[in-house]
Image: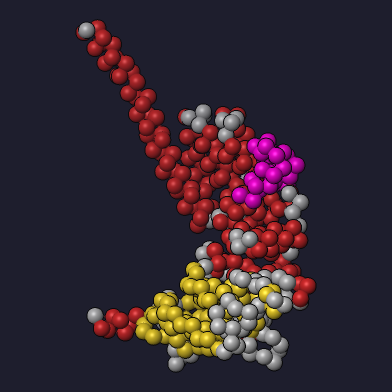
Amino acid sequence: MKIKTVILTTLIILLLPVLLDRFFLILHFNTVSKKLTDAILDNNKAEIFSSIESLKQIARKNSRDALVYRRLAQAYLAVGNEEEAIKSLLIARNLSPKSIIVQRELGLTYILVGQSRVGLRILSNISNSPESLSSLIESILEEQIDEKNYQLVYSLLEASGITFADAEQIANKAVSLEDWRKAFYWLLAAQMLDPELKKTLSFRKVVAIYMSGIDRKNISEEDMSEIPTHRLPSGNKVDIKGGDFRWARDAKEWGVSFGTPAAISSESDIGVMWWNGRIVAFVEVMKEGQYRLRLQMKQSTPPPIAVDVFINQNKLFRVDLTRGDDTWAYIDSLIYLSPGVHMISIVFVNDEIINGLDRNVYINKVSLELISNQNSVNALK
């Protein structure tokens, strides 16, 4: 028993320095890794170079850890040293040949430096089919846009042979399927591919952001410059003519595209929805508080007429117009809004021809009025 205790104690004494050294090395790596992440976000070149030297020291002590070389590659890319980044990733791949993450990063780095065929071949190796490669490219596209690595996104699109028309087509299909998040990514991709046509996509991109809940910081002043925004004046009420709403769909055979006014004609204030789809209007709210949203819509034939009403991506309620007597109906709802620009949208959901009569939606106006603001609520407390 004493011999076993002695052996165990000896092993602990022998292994303790190794274990402690390993522990402090991991701790040091985590500290350096965090500093590197912050330095890349702040574009602090001096700190990035310092992190590179620290990571190289760690690599000399722990040459079997693929993660160390991955972080080295990220640091090299941040200072524009793509050659050293590729060398680091090749070492990481040798250490961890089955790692999909390493393969992805290596393939993207080759694409970034202009070796597109090599990069796509590496990405293809982790895909089972052309369809899965397309899905992989799409997931990388979204990931890199979120990280604002626009140069890499552009290189990936070019390497994949994706054109402006391709990106726009994918985006439009996503819109038709109400996949607004996907639409945003591909619209942004299309804007990168052809900056000259950037403005033609701004309305679609802004709608996609509002409908998906994507951070509105992705909306630029240039994006909003062509989009009318209705503002509440000092009276805390604004009326939006039905004809001032804009289509958020394409019906090119009828001369309608994204951003086309819903007015019957240039001389009419009434908006008409001839087909299923969405029309939108933007309104700027200066005060936080409770607002009355009022819609004036016609009880047209053939009933029932069903439309959904949204604020941004949130569905508020469904309107069912059942009388069919061509009178104007008023639909009221109370909503709570924060300061900023909000998107009101109306969606026609049951377009149909019944006994030769075409069902359409007619909107005279939509009003938004402040009922009580946060200041008045606080004053009552």
Q: Report the number of numbered marks.
A: 0
Q: Quadrant of the N terminus?
A: top left
Residue plotted at (65% across, 72% down): 351
Where residue 365 appears, as percent x and y from the top left, is 56, 87
- Residue 366 or residue 55, whichever sits in front: 366
Residue 134 belongs to magenta span: yes
**Can you give x and y, in whole percent of width and height, for residue 98 in the image?**
59, 31
Residue 343 in which image quadrant: bottom right
What's the magenta bit mostly, secondary-structure-wise? helix
Q: Is residue 265 above or below residue 144?
A: below
Q: Position of residue 30 (x, y in %)?
A: 42, 41
> What residue sits 64% from the left and 51% below the top?
138
Residue 88, position in %: x, y?
59, 37
Viewer-proximal residue among 329 and 30: 329
Height in image: 335 above or below 50?
Answer: below
Q: Residue at x 52, y 52 (%)?
A: 40
Q: Is residue 357 magenta?
A: no
Q: From what the image shows, is residue 367 above or below residue 42? A: below
Q: For this view, does 20 lie left or right of residue 32?
A: left
> What quarter of the picture does the C terminus occupy?
bottom left
Q: Which residues are magenta?
A: 110-139
Does 105 sit left or right of 193 as displayed? left
Q: Nearer the viewer, residue 80 or 270?
A: 270
Residue found at the very far front of the displayed protein: 355
Q: Quadrant of residue 220?
A: bottom right
In the orientation shown, which residue stands out farthest toward the left? 2
